[in-house]
Image: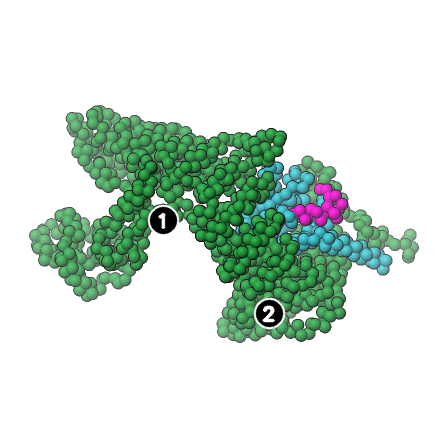
Amino acid sequence: MTSLYAPSADDVMRRLRPFGLFFEKSLKDLIKGIRSCGENPEELERFLSKTLSECRQEVESPDLDLKTNAVVKLTYLEMYGFDMSWANFYILEVMSSSRLQHKRVGYLAASQSFHKDPDILMLATNLLKKDLKYDGNNDVLKMGVTLSGLSTMVTAPLARDICGDLFSMLGSSKPYIRKKAISALFKVFLQYPEALRDNFDKFVAKLEDEDMSVVSATVSVICELSKKNPRPFVQLSPLLYETLFTIDNNWIIIRLLKLFTNLSQVEPKLRAKVLPKILELMEVTSATSVIYESINCIVKGRMLEPDDFDTALSCLEELTKFCNSNDPNLRYISVVLFYKIGKINTGFISEFNTLVIRLLKDVDISIRSRALELLEGITDDENIAQIVQILVKQFADKDVVLANKLLKQTRQENIEIEVPNSYKIKMVGTILRICSLNNYANVPDFDWYLAVLSDLCVISQDLRNENIGLQLGAELRNIMVKVPSMRESCISTIVGLVSNNDICRQLPMVFRECLWCVGEYSSLVSNGNDIIRLVIQQRRLTPEVQQIAAQALIKIFSSWCNTSGSIQINDVKEVIQELIAFFESLSSSKSFEVQERCVEFLEFFKLCAESLEQNDEELPLLITEVLPSFFNAYELNPILHGTLKKVQNSLSIDLDTPFLSEDEVRKLLEEESSKHEAESTLASDLDMDGEFEEDEDEDVEEHAYKDEQLSGRNHTDLTEEEKRVLEKERRKEKLTNPFYLEGDYEDYVVKKENPLIDFSSDQERNYPESSSLLVGEFKNVSENPMKAKKERKKKKKAEVLVDEGVPEPTGDAAVLPDPQLARSISSSKNSSRINLKMQTKLESFNFDQPQQYVEDSGIVGTEGQHEIDQLRAKFAGSSLGQDMDEEVVIVKRKKKKRSKDKKHSKKKDGKGHLTHEESEKRDSVPAPHVEDFPASDPPAQEPL
Amino acid sequence: MTQIKYMLLVSRQGKVRLMRWYSAYDSKERSKISRELATMVLARKAKMCNILEYQDHKVVYKRYASLYFICGISSDSDNELLTLEVIHRYVEAMDSYFNNVCELDIIFNFTKAYEILNEVLVCDGSMTETSKQAILRSVMTMDSLETSDNLDQVLS
């Protein structure tokens, strides 16, 4: 029996809830439950899913307290990886509650889960607008909650709507509100930059606010905005400059320094004024983070000129202090900064070699790994051996560092460090890079370097890193090719590596490059048959290796047969049989490259075997003459990276000069009229291959070509006189011949390998003054630096060939490139990391918004605006479509109206030119709105 | 001044105690980051520096008692020392709010911990309130307001 006054059970529960008395599971129960499950994951799973389903029910309850409680629990569960975006609409309901307790929970949950969910953000917009309605008299804290939550939810339309309110809040008498408004404005500006343009002065005036936290917030906002676009703030520099030296708050100083970093990137004039002050500040202050930021500002703000040694020195001195400190963080950041300074000019850091070497032995691997990057700047031919030795030592799995050495404690302590593989890989890369720097300028002794390389091959085989193998292999090959005096000892090292089965298996790329070297320089090897057997025995090679191996085998065979004097015919036969077996096994390889090569070589060896059958006395001509001529025609020289492309681009084909004059052709034609039939068909077959595109139509030309080939006569043999005459004739013909294309045709054809490449005509085209052939220049390029090098470094034992290249076709290209240039080209290739200047930050410039910042000009880029509006309309339209079926009462009505509006505008968008007017009209709406409010607002500012 | 991308609180057992994302990451990325970072950070020794590189950005962490505070910051333009300072401010603020804060305080009052974080890191992690008093004052007043709000409702 229930009395009228006796409250029902429901009623009691409802009343008790505000006091935290729940009969449902509270957050505390949830946490306790989770903790009691302890280590049993299944039980935990069950408990969590049960709670989750409870939450699903509770969240739908009409009671706001209950709903709020469920939302809190969901927020907690999100940390366990449960997505809560399904509850977004309930969160919105909680947010719209009038009570602060609910609001706080709602906004908290919203900031956790609303990220970039367009549907819900549309709905939240109206709520926020309501909450932010500023009448000068609002509940300070409620406003604070809203403003904090705002930052995650600002969308472009919302930003437009609320910026008026926010600006009037700037006039509030409460610093808290002013501060929050400033920070909320940051997000608004990002979404709606017009607001900043129109209210720039009003916003900037807050830099001189009497409350320090407001100033701080303003500086922060300007600093953040300047990251996106520094230009509009350059005009503030005098004021900021003033502030920097009147203020004694380190937080603000650091932010100002950051701001100047951004500003001086676009306004180089700032450097002269700001740099001395920053240096002064660095001396005065005692705060490490201010010093750090000052150096940061100098380096990143591009205030450090590559020749400004004084500034660099004072920065580096501070950094050295950091490096010697006990705090690993200081050591780390200073190493990073060292690197950045070194990037500007390696000369700055070259004296700090002892410091860097010490850092290489740091306890912390991440500091070591950063120090590795510095090595490029500090190595020279004297310390390289020491550095490499330190690094190679670190390959031991456990590295023990005496801690007392670093920390200056009396207690001795050994710390074992696991050296991760990634560090080892980086280490190998660094060793190779510092050694090969400037075309091996630092390597004092190539015997030593070869030993290092073969050691590295042995110790890095367990890393199973393909890239390392590639680098090591390339390095071995480079030494082989570039240091002629070392080839003898190099080949023995390489043969040693090839015969090491482990390396062949673990580092196939090293094996591949080694094989290539052995093949190319097989004349240096006397026991070629053994190496051939060794390679043949290697099973399970990858196609990339097989393809080089096939080539190498035949080269080795060729030199073995022809150089080693007393060779037994029977041995040769045996080897040929083995090779035939090997190539046969690969002639059905899946890799077509391998297959093709192997089939070719297989056939060749079969021929060899046949001819050996016929003649047992001596080696057949096929082996002694034909085979070597395949490979020994030219000496290989190192070529600068990308040279081939340049050659291709700068050469042209002489399509105008006929091979034979017309008279000659006629004569030949008559002579060989009988043969003509058969040959012309053959020749036209060739034509089909597209090899000789210049032979457009005339049989005459085909003949010319054929005859040319037969007689082995090159057109360059023609005298200048003849050539000129012929050229004239050709030109005439060309004009009347419809089959000639114009323009770039020549350049295109040039790409094909063709015996017609005409160096001399290129000469005329690109370097009109120089009469020498380009070939001659090639030689000069390769010789000159070599000479210079020899003179400069006489103590050097081995001479290193410089990569050959084509000079840039610039105006003064006729002047031979000096060795310095050649070196800088090659070094920039090798060590692009440290020699390149810092990239501008503006390149990575990222506007979150497509809007153009035309800050103070007062003119809106109508086109950009137009696009944005279209986008906005589209965005709004699409999200609204989905909103329709959701049960949200609060904002629905307004929404519908909006959506109609948007759809309307969208429809118009489809109709072309109408759109422009339309959107322009709409553009003009916000501007007066924004300009309106200052007039109407001042009274609102006063009463507070 | 420091564009903080996210802030994680991870226990020594690798459990996430708090997470706040200031940049947009979807839930897959979130769980990946928190999982990977927890293992990376926990594996580091005490003598190592508190900065590591992760994906395309830097991570600054600091250990207080059994909790690791982990912050992701953008790599090129942020001051790592300052980030450490921000973490310290946050811990200090919590310490005075909870009066000797421990991990359990944060677990059971995670909403409060979030509130304090909201006051410390304003506006998507791009700004910091540096005054401890100001932080505490606003959190406290909000608390008291909340209680009186409740009281009002019950009395009505």
Residue A467: x %, y % from top left: 43, 40
Few, some or many residues within 10 Å of mark 2 (<14, 14–19, 20+) = some
Q: Secondary structure at mark 1?
A: helix
**Res. A570 mark:** none
* Left or right of A554 in this view: A390: right
Label 1 marks which chain's residue? A
Q: Is residue A12 above or below residue A548?
A: below
Q: Residue at x 20, y 65 (%)?
A: A735
Colour scheme in the image? Answer: by chain
Mark 1 or mark 2: name the one nearer the start of the chain: 2
Q: Amino acid at mark 2?
A: Asp
Residue A483: x %, y % from top left: 31, 38
Q: Residue at x 60, y 69 (%)?
A: A198
Say which residue label 2 marks. Answer: A198
Residue A822: x %, y % from top left: 33, 48
- Residues in magenta, as a range: B87-103
Depth check: A579 or A168 in front?
A: A168
Q: Is residue A372 in view from this perspective?
A: no
Q: Which chain is green?
A: A
Residue A709: x %, y % from top left: 16, 48
Chain B shown in which color? cyan
Q: Residue at x 27, y 32 (%)?
A: A524
Are labels 1 and 2 on one chain? Answer: yes
**Res. A825 mark:** 1
Depth check: A193 or A406 in front?
A: A406
